[in-house]
Amino acid sequence: MPPIEVFVGVEHILPTNPGAPIPGLPTREQLAEWLAEHERVETETDQFDKGDMIRLKKFAKGSVTLVLPMLEFSVFGTLANLYPKIAKSRQNLSPEDTDLIELTLDTLFALDKLIHLLRFRSENLDQLGLRISWEGLRMGAWSDRETILADMDNFIRTRARWSPSAYENLAATLASIESQTPPSSGSSPSAPPSRLRLDSNASTSSISLANTLLPPNSLGLSRSARYKLSEAYSREAASYASRILSFRNKWIVPSAAILDKLIETSRRPVPDQLLDEQDRIEDKTNGMDGISKFPMQLIMQWKK
């Protein structure tokens, strides 16, 4: 079985290349193969310990009764103490008995060492599974973050800023937005609130100024339709705050929990590269909270 290196490739985790895959890190499929092989060896070892090893000790006891009660010892670290006792009693045993005892003790010693190594390898495999899971969350977080920021940037550049030209082809624009953004619960397509209605005392000059800001083909559009457009953009702007909250729950919270578990279970100190990378991801996520408010601030232009 190949050696298990839990922290392979940590030198490739760099702040200048966030989200880059780690060369040499085993895949989830490779880990599954190693786990299956490990389980097979464990099963064979357990079968030998409960089958052939018992028969070997019984056979040795049937041949020699002077020192073989010591064969009941099978804990790693205690078997070496038996060899001096065997040597001391060697003069009372035939060469065949001595060989049989030594063979039995050597087998016990090797079996206990194998069990110890299998236990240590099992821990390493569990920790490697944690490392692979953390790496997947790390790369997913960086990728998803870039997607959210790119979508937000596109929204700000193309739709969020108010412009008279936004009312051109209004029906097509509304249909496109509503196909992507589901309406919020409790919303109604009825007329807009009274705060958006024209004041009955507004001067004729103010109305004329407002009309000159709109494209000619939008003068006949109802104020309700324009309100509906601004509400659709408001929902799209608000969706970025929801996406960032989901981002935190999907990537940041699980990755932090897995890293904490790796720190608790690892026999070796977790490299600083992993700790620093987790801090970078969390800091960038905190920065996204402030950025997500900007689209909504731009949308307020549509309601003034």
Image (tube, helix red, strand yellow):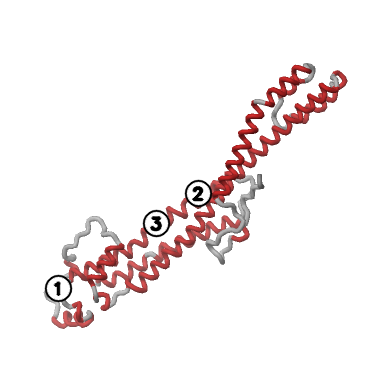
Q: Amino acid at mark 3?
A: Leu
107 shown above or below 210: above
Of residue 295 and residue 158, the one placed in the foreground of this image is 158
Numbered mark located on residue 199 in the image:
1
Q: Amino acid at mark 2?
A: Ala
| Residue 95 horizontal/vertical position (percent) | 85, 23
| Residue 218 horizontal/vertical position (percent) | 20, 77
Q: Quadrant of residue 171?
A: bottom left
Of residue 297 and residue 63, the one placed in the foreground of this image is 63
Query: If you read the primary sequence from the N terminus, does the residue marked by circle 3 or circle 2 appear first?
Result: 3
Which residue position is annotated with label 2? Answer: 257
Which residue position is annotated with label 3? Answer: 245
- Please tell me how crowded label 3 is: few (under 14), some (14-19), or many (20+) other residues with Cα within 10 Å: some
Numbered mark located on residue 131 in the image:
none
In front: mark 3 or mark 1? 3
Q: Quadrant of residue 33?
A: top right
Residue at image point 84% right, 25% down: 87
